[in-house]
């Protein structure tokens, strides 16, 4: 163990993959896509990050950053950085632990855990990892019981998929014109379907998507032991 963490890799070891990862919780009353959200609440952000399932402990709180600032992924040390934004009824976490292309699905696991805590909330989570091919995982939960999970390598077979995209469209009231504009074809095969587009459309129906002029808290954390093991496999192993 190094750096008071569960890592076996040195903090300067280079990351071999890159990706994006985000989980958003929209509590009731959901603001809708035309609402004006309040400024970031750092106190609520501290509570949220401390209770998130991938995190064993918060080591340090850093200076806040703009919500649109790119996530650095250069060395192993960057994998300890987590961002949280809390804007009114919307809470969002950007945690590299959500990305995993092995046998577990942190996007689904953390979404299910939050659904247990907040049954009245919409939860939309996604993670994509690029390394020669693109791996993606998406989870969408609506309080009416509609849920969807999809994960796999783009264009390849043997996807993990539960739920129905058409049920998501119905529950969120996504217009057909929006599907066309986002290039979401409900008749596409699972392994080429635009899951990311569907997730964005669902989130846009319940909360504003723009993160311009918003800030987020930044934390250096110690992830749990099991999470750290999965992160080494995902981000550091060739």
Image (cartoon, rainbow, N blue to C red):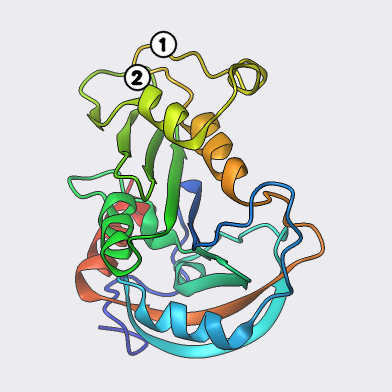
Query: Can you say whether 175 is above or below 107 in the image?
Result: above
Going 25% across and 83% down the picture, which residue do you hit? 1
Q: CA distance from mark 2 to mark 1?
A: 8 Å
Query: Can you say whether 70 is above or below 13 in the image?
Result: above
Query: Looking at the image, can residue 16 be seen?
Result: no
Query: Label 2: how many residues lie within 10 Å, few (<14), some (14-19) or many (20+)?
Result: some
Query: Can you say whether 68 is above or below 8 in the image?
Result: above
Query: Label 1: how many residues lie within 10 Å, few (<14), some (14-19) or many (20+)?
Result: few
Query: Looking at the image, can residue 218 be seen?
Result: yes
Going 53% across and 19% down the picture, which residue do you hit? 184
Residue 164 vs residue 236, the one in the foreground: 164
SS state under label 2: loop
Residue 52 locus on image (x, y percent): 36, 73
Residue picked out by circle 1: 188
Q: Are marks 2 and 1 in contact (CB under 8 Å)?
A: no
Residue 220 locus on image (x, y percent): 49, 81
Residue picked out by circle 2: 191
């Amino acid at each position: 163990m190094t750096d008071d963490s569960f890592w076996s890799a040195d903090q300067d070891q280079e990351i071999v993959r890159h990706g994006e990862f985000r989980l958003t919780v929209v509590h009731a009353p959901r603001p809708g896509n035309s609402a004006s959200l309040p400024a970031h609440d750092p106190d609520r952000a501290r509570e949220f990050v401390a209770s998130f399932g991938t995190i064993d402990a918060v080591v340090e709180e850093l200076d806040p950053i703009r919500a649109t600032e790119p996530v650095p992924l250069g060395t192993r040390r960057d994998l300890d950085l987590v961002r949280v934004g809390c804007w009114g009824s919307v809470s969002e976490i950007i945690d590299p632990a959500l990305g995993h292309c092995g046998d577990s699905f942190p996007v689904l696991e953390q979404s299910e855990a939050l659904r247990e805590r907040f049954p009245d909330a919409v939860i939309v989570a996604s993670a994509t990892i690029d390394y020669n091919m693109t791996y993606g995982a998406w989870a969408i939960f609506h309080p009416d019981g509609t849920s969807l999970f999809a994960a796999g390598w783009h264009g390849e077979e043997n996807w993990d998929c539960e739920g129905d995209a058409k049920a998501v469209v119905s529950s969120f009231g996504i217009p057909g014109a929006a599907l066309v504009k986002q290039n979401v074809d409900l008749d596409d095969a699972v392994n080429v379907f635009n899951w990311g587009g569907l997730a964005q459309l669902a989130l846009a129906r319940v909360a504003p998507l723009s993160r311009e002029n918003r800030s987020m808290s930044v934390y250096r954390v110690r992830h749990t032991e099991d999470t750290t093991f999965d992160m080494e496999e995902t981000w550091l192993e060739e």
